Amino acid sequence: MLIASDHGGLELKQIIVEFLQSRGIEVNDLGVHADDSVDYPDYAALVATPISNGDEKEGILVCGTGIGMSIAANKFSGVRAALVHDEFTAQMAREHNNANILVLGGRVLKPELACRMVDVWLNGQFEGGRHQNRLNKIIQLSSEDNSDK
Ligand code: RB5
């Protein structure tokens, strides 16, 4: 599992890395490893690029609120980055949106809740059907030129 954060998400990232490892999940931690101020798009790109090009299946991003990471990651083709707030939105991110990046706010979430959210997302199943039709429409949107609308 790929994971990265900026300085605002560092503390929660460390907790999630340990949580994943305790579940026997191999983690590729792409930083940050210190709390110096960095720019979150650089770390969003580290996780989103291999997912976008098909080298990796999914990942986790953490910044202070999760907002910047989700905006940045969703610029990458094929990435469905979902900023989630609780177990319900984590579950929906998998079942309805088939999110391939889970985005968390390190300054927003209690660590225990965040770990439960990761668990729910990891173990959920995409429902397909009408939800796949909606994902297809999102692909269609990105192939159209919507930049001046
Ligand atoms: C960094 O101070 C903060 O802006 C960042 O972690 C994130 O919350 C951005 O959306």
Image: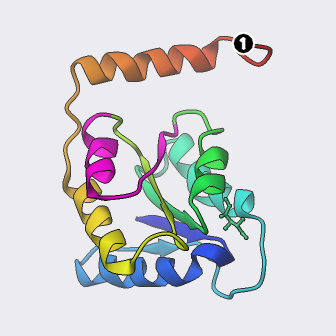
Residue 129 to residue 17: above or below? above
Residue located 33% across and 15% down the image: 133
Residue 127 in which image quadrant: top left
* In the displayed structure image, the side of residue 71 where residue 107 appears, left or right: left
Above or below, comparing residue 28 to residue 54 in the picture: below
Q: Position of residue 14 (x, y in %)?
A: 47, 84
Q: Position of residue 28 (x, y in %)?
A: 48, 72
Which kind of residue does numbered mark 1 sit on?
Asp
**Residue 35 on the magenta segment:** no
Please state which of residues 149 and 74 is positioned toward the viewer in this rendering.
149
Residue 30 versus residue 121: which sits nearer the camera? 121
Q: Residue at x 58, y 72 (%)?
A: 30
Figure quadrant of residue 134: top left
Q: How many marks?
A: 1
Q: Quadrant of the N terminus?
A: bottom left
Local secondary structure at mark 1 = loop
- For the residue pair 108 and 116, the one nearer the viewer reads as 108
Beta carbon of the mark 1 residue lies under 8 A of ligand 1: no
The span shown in magenta is 79-96
Question: Is residue 121 toward the left or the right of residue 81 in the image?
Answer: left
112 lies above or below 123: below
Q: Which residue is mark 1?
A: 145
Where residue 71 appears, as percent x and y from the top left, is 64, 45
Colouring mode (rainbow / by chain / secondary structure / one colour): rainbow
Would residue 116 appear left or right of 29 to someone viewing this image?
left
